[in-house]
Image (cartoon, rainbow, N blue to C red):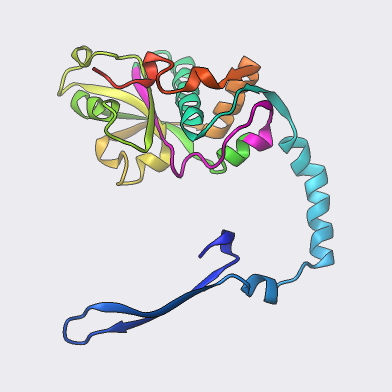
Amino acid sequence: TNDLGKSVAHAQLAINKETKQVSVVKSEVDSNLFAKQYQNNANIDMIYNQYNERYINPVKNQKLGKASGDFDERSLANFAVEAMYKKVHELYPDLDTKAAFTNINGGIRNTLNNGNITYGDIYSVFPFDNEIVIMETTGKKLNNYCAGNLNNAAFYQEVYEYGVLTSSGKYLFITTDYLASNSGYFLSAGDVKVYTKITVRDCVAEAIRNKKTIKADEYKTNAKNEFKPIK
């Protein structure tokens, strides 16, 4: 369905008993169902507005810093993986993590415009409570991920040359619990070693607070060697 659940899809299917093939007879999307059957309720609106004023807005409207330039999904993902990498190195200095990864499409849900940044802005970019985790994998697999084979991934690494790694050696990298548990991403890469209990959203918000101003040009993929593939 579309429109955050406000539309409902109807489909009529036919099954061939002999070939078992399924075909669509007809399908449609009803975009008016919500409007026709559900109207605003004054009592519900009053309850929502009270919570919005007392609890949501004070958090949502917290100013974190400023954006110098417009951030698209790719530059926001680059900012996120840098923040994840540096936060993990701060909290776990004895763990030699080599890289950080996150997904772009699906993981980054909005953009940031030039100007003030609030916590609500960051919430709209990272609406999910994805936790930062540390995983272990082999040098060969880590190189494959850092070689830019994943079109939907942003990565931050300080390896630069594959010769630093050995093919069968075990190395640590940083990602999210969602990607770690999704077979389409990193599940086959290795085992989760640490659950940090820190969300990507809060990690990014803290990084913006510390920097005060973040520059979009500094987070283009070609801006830093750390965003580039291992050679």
Q: Is residue 99 visible?
A: yes
Q: Answer with left or right where residue 211 lies relative to residue 44.
A: left
* Residue 28 pos. (x, y %): 48, 75
Closest to the observer: 129 or 215?
215
| Image point (56%, 27%), residue name | 204
Closest to the observer: 76 or 217?
217
* Residue 39 pos. (x, y %): 75, 71
| Image point (41%, 23%), residue name | 221
Q: Answer with left or right where residue 62 lies relative to residue 185.
A: right
| Image point (31%, 24%), residue name | 172
* Residue 181 pos. (x, y %): 36, 44
| Image point (61%, 41%), residue name | 124
Magenta includes 112?
A: yes
Q: Which residues are magenta?
A: 97-121
Q: Is residue 210 visible?
A: no
* Residue 188 pos. (x, y %): 25, 40
On the image, which quarter does residue 206 sit in?
top right
Q: Quadrant of the C terminus?
A: top left
Q: Answer with left or right where residue 81 lies relative to residue 31.
A: left
Q: Is residue 172 above or below residue 31?
A: above
Q: Is residue 116 above or below residue 12?
A: above
Magenta includes 228?
A: no
- Mark count: 0
